Amino acid sequence: MFRSLYLIGILSLIWVAAQDIVPDDPEVQMQMHAMFYTARVACADENMIPYANVLQFNNTGDLPDDKDKVTSMCYFHCFFEKSGLMTDYKLNTDLVRKYVWPATGDSVEACEAEGKDETNACMRGYAIVKCVFTRALTDARNKPTV
């Protein structure tokens, strides 16, 4: 039994090392969550959108087709910018990997390339955010849970 626990511990360490993601200590995590909250509130004040749109996007990676779709795009672009997850259409790889999803391969570069030809800032930012969320949702669905 102890051998099994030891083996599980070693395998867990190898898995964490393979992920190359070092979790923040609890105090930093609390600060980050507070910063995310501040960004969320600020962006909600700037872009009045139905909370149902946020929930739908977080669950599906899509926004409803309605007259407020561009406003919703602006909200998500705003959130990623104000939270530091993205600056000038460049993703902060460390933050994205720690707090959104553990991006692998060329995922970050692929998402940053989304919407490059878009002239509307909200639509371009949203294209990147949508790519990140779509990949995160796809990865989550493809990983078995224990």
Image (tube, helix red, strand yellow):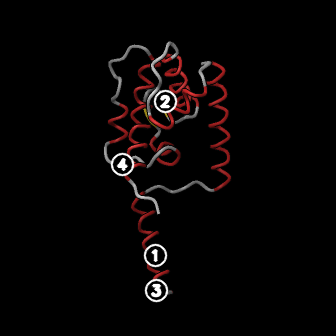
Which residue is drawn at the image coordinates 49% and 22% (left, top)? 73
Of residues 137 and 7, the one drawn nearer to the viewer in this rendering: 137
Q: Residue 84 has which mark?
A: none
Q: Position of residue 74 (x, y in %)?
A: 52, 20
Could you tell which of marks 2 and 1 lies nearer the N-terminus? 1
Q: Mark 4 belongs to which amino acid?
A: Thr
* Secondary-structure class at tag 4: loop
Q: Is residue 76 left or right of residue 135?
A: right
Q: Which residue is mark 1?
A: 8
Q: Which residue is mark 3?
A: 3
Circle 2 or circle 1, nearest the eye: 1
Could you tell which of marks 4 and 1 lies nearer the N-terminus? 1
- Number of other residues with Cα within 10 Å of mark 2, as a class: few under 14, some 14 to 19, many 20 or more: few
Q: Residue 87 has which mark?
A: 2
- Number of other residues with Cα within 10 Å of mark 1, as a class: few under 14, some 14 to 19, many 20 or more: few
Q: What's the CA distance linking mark 4 and mark 1?
A: 24 Å
Could you tell which of marks 3 and 1 lies nearer the N-terminus? 3
Q: Which residue is mark 4?
A: 104
68 relative to 27, above or below: above
Circle 2 or circle 3, nearest the eye: 3
Task: Tell me whether the residue at label 2 lies in contact with that at label 4, contact meaning CB atoms closer than 8 angstroms.
Answer: no
* Secondary-structure class at tag 1: helix
